[in-house]
Image (cartoon, grey):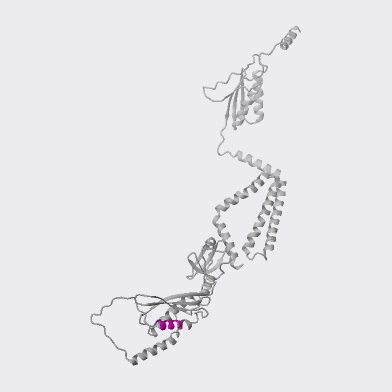
Amino acid sequence: MKKLLFIFCLCFFTVPVSAPAQTDPPEVENTESTEETTPDVPQKVDVEPLAEDEDISSRLVRILRATQWFEQPEVEVEEGVVFLRGRTPNEAHKEWAGRLAGNTQDVVAVVNRIQVIERSMWDLSPAWLELQSLGKETVQSSPLIAVGLIFLVVTWLVTKWSTQMAAYFLQRRVQSDLLRDVVSRAVAVPVFLLGLYLVLKVSGLSRLAVTVLGGTGLLGLVIGFAFRDIAENFLASILISIQRPFNGGDLIQVAGFKGFVQSVNTRSTLLMTLEGNHVQIPNATIYKETITNYTANPSERFDFTVGIGYEDSIEQAQSVAMSVLQNHPAIVKDLDSLVLVEKLGAATVNLRIYFWVDIARYSSLKVNSAIIRLVKKAFEEAGISMPDESREVVFPAGVPIHMISDAEQKVIESQKKKSVSKASETLVNPAEGDLTSEAEEIKQQAQKSRSPESGQNLLES
């Protein structure tokens, strides 16, 4: 009894030689080599440790096995130094085991020899675990997803209704079908975005909802750069459908192409040339280029030059040419036709003949050909010469001279008088056809041909 009392007093009044260290004991990494890293010397070492080495070893082994993170864990303790062995597939688990051993009572140092198992490239266990986690979260979020789907259907119905209402209010205020459709869809865009935001919020995807609304402007900017040409042609088609610089069937010339307008869609304008070829011109080019519309004014003026000899009467030549123009049915009588002296050439007096053609009914190419042919014939019958350019002619034997008698002079004058009345006898010939416009022929060819581009014709709205 006295011996026990003496030991109690000794423990109560005597200060312990060492106390547990506040910092973790140093951990020695496993190098699996002959030269191991020397651990740092602990600040204090218990002379009489309270925990035995076997107790520390058994306690750590039970903990490592309980985690199920390690394969064949082994712990060996010698004089407070813990030696850890085993295998684990995760580097973090190895570090955790080292910290666990270092925080154990009366442990001086830790030598961590646990090996990290390198996962095979064919190991799909992480993906399987991720799928399991995703499935679990999906099941837990199924009620919110169901409510979100209901909101999505409501959003679609409200968006469709807003589009129809906008189209109804614009029906009498905007004539272009394309413009009404664009404005109606533009009104529906904010409605759809608001509904989508609510759907994501209800589904628990608040962060994604903010991203959608915040990224809409950036997305629009990216799409604008990527589809700049498409957007430019689309906007040009809207302006063309509003301003109507031409109608379907008009004969126009733009960007170096001349043809009849077939259709205008959201991307391009389709022309059929006089040669029967389809030409697609981007609407942006149509809107920027200079457009010549030959059909807007049903009358078009043409001209050509003819040269007469210096010995011929200019007044007579003008009268003969005017007679041809006045007697031709394709020439517009309400507009003045002109036969003007253009210049005095080297061997001819050049006359320029101006005349107007009703291109809505007649072909300008055919009429121009017929007028040139009839003027030439009238000049020949009237005895008006049309000499070639001046050239040097040598007559070695001299030039024979024949004096015209009075009787021959009378015959020539009578022929000149009759030529004016006969000049317009043959207005057409088989080579020139019936002089009618080829617009109807082009239209028939267009109906038989395959359209190179489908879509709504904006000129028909």
Residue 13 % position (x, y):
72, 11
Left or right side of 332 for 1? right
Quarter that holds the N terminus: top right
**Residue 145 appears in the rendering:** yes
Indicate the quadrant where residue 109 lies: top right
Question: In the figure, 90 relative to 336: above or below?
Answer: above
Say which residue appears at 68% left-offset and 59% top-offset. 163
Residue 299 location, x and y as percent? 52, 75
Identify the residue at the far top of this view: 2
State which region is magenta: 314-322
Q: Position of residue 110 (x, y in %)?
A: 60, 22
Q: Position of residue 222 (x, y in %)?
A: 57, 50
**Quadrant of res 92:** top right
Q: Quadrant of residue 22?
A: top right
User: How many numbered circles are shown?
Assistant: 0
Q: Which residue sits at x=69%, y=12%?
A: 15
Q: Residue furthest left?
A: 397
**Type of secondary structure dominating the magenta stretch:** helix
Picture layout, residue 105 above or below residue 382: above
Task: Assign the C terminus to one quadrant of the image.
Answer: bottom right
Describe residue 437's horizontal placement relative to residue 155 as left or right. Answer: left
Out of 187 and 243, give the one closest to the viewer: 243
Q: Residue 257: within the magenta? A: no
Left/right placement of residue 248 relative to residue 391 reads right
Q: Nearer the viewer, residue 384 or 216?
A: 384
Q: Is 318 in the magenta?
A: yes
